[in-house]
Amino acid sequence: MRFSTVAATVCLGLLAVVGGIAAVPPGRSTEVPASPGAVAPAANSAPAAPAPLSGDAAAKHAKRTACLKSAKAKKLVGAEKTSFLKACIAAP
């Protein structure tokens, strides 16, 4: 009887510790900055939007996609697929 009481207390204590660790999101520390001014002003700004693709980059992407579809239709794999893609993308 006494053993089960001790075991239950230990389990509940471990549960509390694990719950406390799980409550902290990954990558975040529980430390508080020394002063309110210590936070970088860039942290409050909105994230930058990704740059739009230029015409050349869009054309390369379209060509690569077409070459990948061709390779898939021909059921190429491994070195054959790699060499086919290099030749296909390099072709005018």
Image (cartoon, rainbow, N blue to C red):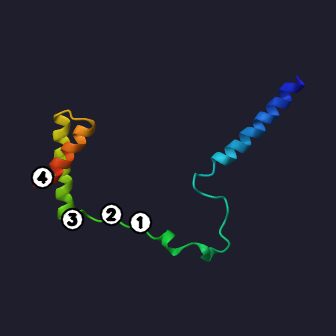
SS type, badge 3: loop
Image position of 39 (left or right of 66): right
Question: For the point 72% across and 39% down, which residue is it?
Answer: 15
Foreground disc of the pair 2, 4: 4
Where does label 4 land, which residue?
Answer: 91
Residue 40 at x, y percent in the picture:
54, 73
Tell me the distance, in whole angstroms, between the alpha carbons under discs 2 and 3.
12 Å
Foreground of the two, 23 or 63: 63
Q: Which mark is residue 50?
A: 2
Where does label 3 land, which residue?
Answer: 54
Residue 53 at x, y percent in the picture:
24, 62
SS type, badge 2: loop
Q: Which mark is residue 47?
A: 1
* Disc 2 to disc 1: CB gap under 8 Å: no
Question: For the point 19% across and 39% down, which residue is it?
Answer: 71
Which of disc 4 and disc 1 is earlier in sequence?
Answer: 1
Foreground disc of the pair 4, 3: 4
Tell me the distance, in whole angstroms, between the alpha carbons under discs 2 and 1.
9 Å
Image position of 81 (left or right of 32): left
Name the amino acid, label 1.
Answer: Pro
Q: Residue 49 occupies which quadrant of the picture?
A: bottom left
